[in-house]
Image (cartoon, helix red, strand yellow):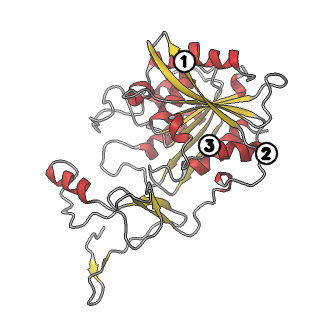
Amino acid sequence: MDYVMHRLADTDLWYWTVKLPRGARFSYRLSPNDTLAGFDGPRADQRIATTQSDPLNPHRLECSPDATRYVCRSLAELPGAPPQPWLVKKVGTPEGKVEARTIHSNIQKLDREISIYTPAGYTPNGTPNRLLVLFDGDEYLSSQMGITVTMDNLIAAHKIPPTLVLLVLNPDGRRLKDLVANPEFADSMAKEIIPWVWAKYNVTHDAAQTAVGGYSAGGLAANYMALRYSNIFGNVISQSAAIWWSPEQGIYDRDPSIEGNWMARQFADGPKLPVRFYIEAGAFEFDSLGQGGDILEASRELRDVLQAKGNEVHYHQFVGGHDALTWPGTIADAIIELLGG
């Protein structure tokens, strides 16, 4: 690909043209005077220090009124980008409530913060609510991800029955330690946190009406929960999950000579589990560095393995990257597919 920029007539503007797929939605930044000398060493530090938002694009992300251009990201939405109607707050739509709680884990020997979303009209008796468990709960609660608005809209439109959402937060410094296939964390979820929710709230105990989900490392954790405890988690929402991971190569030291996608191997080698899946990945999440497969390739492989085992799999590929712009909209589709009806 030609990365050479061209000057616009006699101005101080330079441009570069690249052809992108219709419907793309992504964020980007500009790196002035970039030497393209790689992503390690002093040049990488220089890039991090000077990368900035596009001054000619008014659409920005992570940009508070007093933020500098070095903090903000620019947003691009090409024609045909999928609408995200469930993220729009509607006047008159009954709103659920969110309460913060703390649970002590004897298994992990720590306190874990959680948040519980109960839908509008929730009562402690009657038909049990369905249950949705989401990792990186604070992110899903953010204004960008907007899970509470999405749930309010889906329930009000009768796309799903009343559903309680358990949002699991990460103790400081433990996100990857817990979410990357940690058996102690899985045991804590299955033996401490979920039973606590069952005891405190009017919520289903039926795995077929329970979904667990997350993005990136959280998506890996969601698959791992179903792998170990399919009797509790009967549905998985895997949003751009770090499925490429394997214990032989870890998170940071990736080696293309080592086989990745440990999760797909576990599902392939074991018996068919009573679990349904919604798996999605972005067209821009491919292995551009030749590391033996990234999110896109690994998600396709996991899809193929599960379908070969006979599992129900809903696969979605979007035109975007690993930047939380598509997940807030597509999680509504996942919830409808797995918990609707």
Give the mark nearer the N terminus: 3 vs 2. Answer: 3
Q: Residue furthest front?
A: 66
Give the amino acid at mark 2: Ala
What residue is shown with label 1? Answer: 103
Q: Is residue 5 above or below residue 245?
A: below
Give the mark nearer the N terminus: 1 vs 2. Answer: 1
Which x, y percent locates residue 223? 53, 30
Q: Is residue 325 above or below residue 202?
A: below
- In three-dimensional space, the C-alpha distance between marks 3 and 2, rounded to whole angstroms, equals 14 Å
Give the amino acid at mark 1: Ile
Q: Secondary structure at mark 3?
A: helix
Q: Residue at x 49, y 22 (%)?
A: 112
Is residue 46 visible in this depiction of the protein? yes
Relative horizontal placement of residue 293, taking residue 141 as reference (left or right): left
Tell me if label 3 and label 2 are in contact, CB under 8 Å. no
Give the mark nearer the N terminus: 3 vs 1. Answer: 1
**Mark drawn on residue 147:** 3
What residue is shown with label 2? Answer: 156
